[in-house]
Each structure stands twice: as structure tokens, then as C-alpha cells.
Image (tube, rainbow, N blue to C red):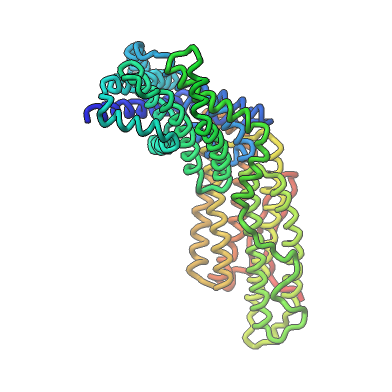
Amino acid sequence: MLTFLTIAGGVALILFGVRFVRKGLDRLFGDRLSTVLRRLAGSRWRAAGAGLVASLAAPSSTAMSLLAVQSVRNGDLPARRMIPVLLGADVGITVMVILIALRLEAFAPVLVLAGMVLFQFTRSRPLRGVGQVLLAVAFILMGVETIATAARGFEPNGDLGELLAIAARYPWLLAAVAAALAVCLQSSTAAIGLAIGLGQGLANGGTGAIDPLVLAVPIVAGANVGVAVTLLTAGWSDRAARRLGLANAVCKATIAALFLIGGAWLVGVIHALPLTLEAKVAVSHTGFNVLMAALFLPWTDTLYAFTRWVIPDRPTTVEAPSTPRFITGNHVTGASVALGQSRQEIVRLSAMVRKMLDDAWHALAERDERAAKAVQARDDDVDTLHHHIKRYLTTINPDDDAGFRTRTVMQQLAFLNQLETIGDIVDKSIAESAVRRSRSHVWFTDEGWAELDGFYKHVAENLLIAETAFNTQDRSLAQRLIDHKRRMNERERQLRLQHFERLRAGVELSHESSALHLDLLTHLKAINSGVAHIAYAILDDTEFASIPTVAATDDKGEDYRADGLTTPAT
């Protein structure tokens, strides 16, 4: 029992060291690693090189997995380009196992001393980060040595000896256990460090009945698969990140299967190398990832196409381009029936505009030029349908129905004009910004993008509230919309100030994206102001006597605006 607890303590030391490495690297590099990836990931070979460089600087599988998921979710890099980045990163991450193989545990106390001095007694963030990394490496080395010391004293006929003997006969099961261990610990280094520690103990204190490499090779294969499962789990909620995780899992599972199928031959080849046991384990781990990169880098586009087939895009309902569905023509019997039909058509138009806004923002986030241009093409449908509805409303004669109120026509015309204006803003500004961003190297800071995305979500919510308030004539929703408008105006001012603070602090990405950042805030605020006007008409019969003009400026400096109407055309 004491042997088991000692080995568990060694694993805990390795795990603590790995997590301490991540914290130290965050302190040392901040968001600069993600910036390196964004700027270097051009072709697939450059992307793999960028991943290799980033992982050498941050040799943590979990850190790289989280960075990959975050970059794909934020639209910094598409999943197609992130696949080769991860293939290169997987090779670089093996540097931590190579450090373990160098048998530096005798220097662990020196590393602890140096790391403690830098981490505890300096104020510089980079120096504290270096100290944290040194401490982490020392903890990992001490953890491996603790496992090796415990394994040297085990009895061949004891419980641990029997377990290891069984594991040696079932490499697939051993690989599955190693994968589960890597998932639970969120670290392949911890699982492989356990293999190295047990191997040292068996080689130095065992009877030789169990070949340490027979255990190490399946553990290496399983630990790498476990890292892929961690990435897949981390990105499951996002479709693009899920495709990335699936592609990585396919790569690792394929190489793991080759390792296990050819296990006996592979063990013989590695045994022939004139290296220490620790170095042989490190060679198997590095060889796993080098082989994976060599096999799959030329086929990353095919691999991504496969993931798109397995995880297809959400099915989308294609709106009828511009043909009205609910209005029947120029001749209607009864104003009440006519206004009911026009209301349904306007709600349909509102749904089309909301979809345009959502898709344009998604194209901006994903840097997808094709999707942005598709949104711009749909603005023609909005304009045409707007024309049909407006013409229909002007044919309604108030004398056709004694209960007809001019205010209802005015309300519908006003909301109709606001929707047409919002469609223009989405077309000329947001979708156009998405096109420009897809062609440029403009990147937002993580904080700046989070602010923009949060503001957009509130605007999209307000557009839905306006549509519902218009359709139901709900006064409470109308009041809520007005309250939201006031808060959103204040929020927009706060976001501008926060952006200016980042500029003053010298954040490079904020300077590069400043114009686009401020333009997007302006356009979103204009949309929010436009949708709020319907609330005034619902709450006050006289409000439409003078509706404020909503104006925004497109990227060419031209104004486009929706003017309030005072009387219906006849």
C-alpha cells in the first residue's frame, strides 16, 4: 500500500509541476503566443512551424489545447489552419519528456532554489514567470524520481508486480488506462512521466521479468490519445472547435493503433538504440508525434473535409428570395385583414434581417469572406420585399374598415423603414468589415473581442424584443426595449473608454484593430437605436408624429438614414 501511495504522490508532483508550468508561461508570455500563431500561420507548413515554435515556448499539451480552442472560437484562426498548427505543436510539446529523459533530477534542488528566488523575491512579471517555470520543472523531475524510488522496492510477486505483469500482456488495455489517466490529469507528461519512473524502478531494482519498454510504448500511445480526447472535450460546444478536436483525435488514434499493432517490432527497434531507458521512452514519444506530423501534414485539407462530413454545418432554411408570402396583392377586403397580412410579412422581414445580422457577425468572427458576401447579396432580397410591403400598405383605404386607425399603418411603415435601414447597415458596414478583415492581418485582443461580441449579443436580443413587441403590441416589452436602449448607450460609452485605455497602455493589437473596433461599436449602436423606435409608437400614440432619424456612416463616408413618416402615402 505504501508503494502505491508513494507512486501516487510522485504523479501528484508531476501534475502540480505541469500546471505550474502553465501558470508560469501565462505570466511570462501573456497573449503573445496566440499573436505568434495568428501572424505565422499562413501555409500549412508555416502553420506547423508556428505551432512548433509556440509549443517549445509553452511545452504543455493542455495549454496548447486551450489556446487552439480559444483561437478557433474567437475566429483568430479557422479550424482548417489550426490542424497543422497542432501537428507542429505536438512535436514541440515532447520537449518536456526529453528534459525528464536527461536525468536532471540531481539538479532539482538547484532549480527549486533559483526558481524560488525569482518567483518570491522579484517584482518583474517575466522574471516571476521564469521562476515559476524553473520550480515546475524541478517538481516534475522530483515526481519522476519519487516514482522510480518506489518502483525499485516492489516485490515481483506482490500486488504491483502482478498488475504490471498483467498490463504487459494486454497492451491495448494498458493504452486505454493511460488515455484515461491523461484525460483525468489533463496531461500527457504526467502519464509518460509515470511510465519513465516505473521503467527506472524496474530497470534498477526489479528482477528483469518485465521489460519496461513493453509497458512504456502502450502508455505513450494511450497518453497521446488522452490529450486528443481532452482537446475534443474542451471544444465540444463549438462546431468549428469540435471539428478541430475530431481531426486531432483521428491523427493520434491512427498512430496509436500503428504503435500497438507493431508493438513487438517497435520495442525491438527501440531496444537496439544505444540510449538509456529514459531516452528510449522519450524517443518513442517524440517519434509518435513526428510520425503523425509527417503522415498527416500533406493531407490536412482532406482531413478537414472529412470532419465537415462527420460534423456538417447546421441545416439552414432558405428564405424565399423576395416574393411576399402573406400579402395577397393590391386589392384587399377590409383594412383589418390587410393589416394582419402586412404585419405577418413585416415579422418575416424582421426575421430575415436578424439572420443577416447573425450571419454577418459570424462571418466577421470566422474571417469568412464567402459568408460575408453571401450576407451582402441577401440585402437585395430585403430591399425588394421592403418595397412590396410598403407599396401594399399604401393601397389600404382607411374607409374600408370603421375600426381602422391610421396609427397602425404609421407604426408598420416606420418599423418597415427601420428594418430596411438595419439591413443596409449590416450590408454596407458589418459584412463589409468582415470582408476586409478576412483579407487583412487585423486581430482583436481577447478582451476587445469579448467586449464587441457581448455588445453584439445585446443588440441582437433587442432586435428580437422589438420584433416581438411589434407583433404582440406588448407595452411591457416596449418599455423594456426603451430601458435597454438607455443602458446600451451607456455601455457603448464604457466600451469606448476601455478601448482607449488599452490604446494608452500600448497594447499592440488594440492599435491595429482600433478603427475597426470603433466602427463596429458605432454600427451596432445605430442598429440598437433603430429597433428601439418601435417602442415609442407602442407606448405613445403621438410618438410617430416625429420619429428621430437613425443615421450611420458607411466605410466610404456616405450617410444612409431612415426618416420617420408623418402620413401614409396614398
Judging depth in this view, the residue of 159 and 101 nearest the camera is: 159
Which quadrant does the N terminus fall into? Answer: top left
Could one spot residue 186 in this view of the protein?
A: no
From where the camera sits, is residue 291 visible?
yes
Q: Residue at x 49, y 59 (%)?
A: 483
The x, y position of residue 430, in whole percent, is: 66, 48
Which one is nearer the viewer's eye here, 317 or 253? 253
Q: Position of residue 526 (x, y in %)?
A: 62, 53
Which residue is found at the position 65% from the left and 42% from the top? 367
15 to the left or right of 234: left
Q: Residue at x 60, y 41 (%)?
A: 75
Residue drawn where x is 50% and y is 57% of the image = 484
Relative to 359, is 166 above or below? Answer: above
Give the number of callouts: 0
Q: Quadrant of residue 132?
A: top left
Q: Is residue 76 left or right of residue 220?
A: right
Give the answer, above or below, for where 379 lies relative to 12: below
Q: Which residue is at the front of the view, 197 or 482?
A: 197
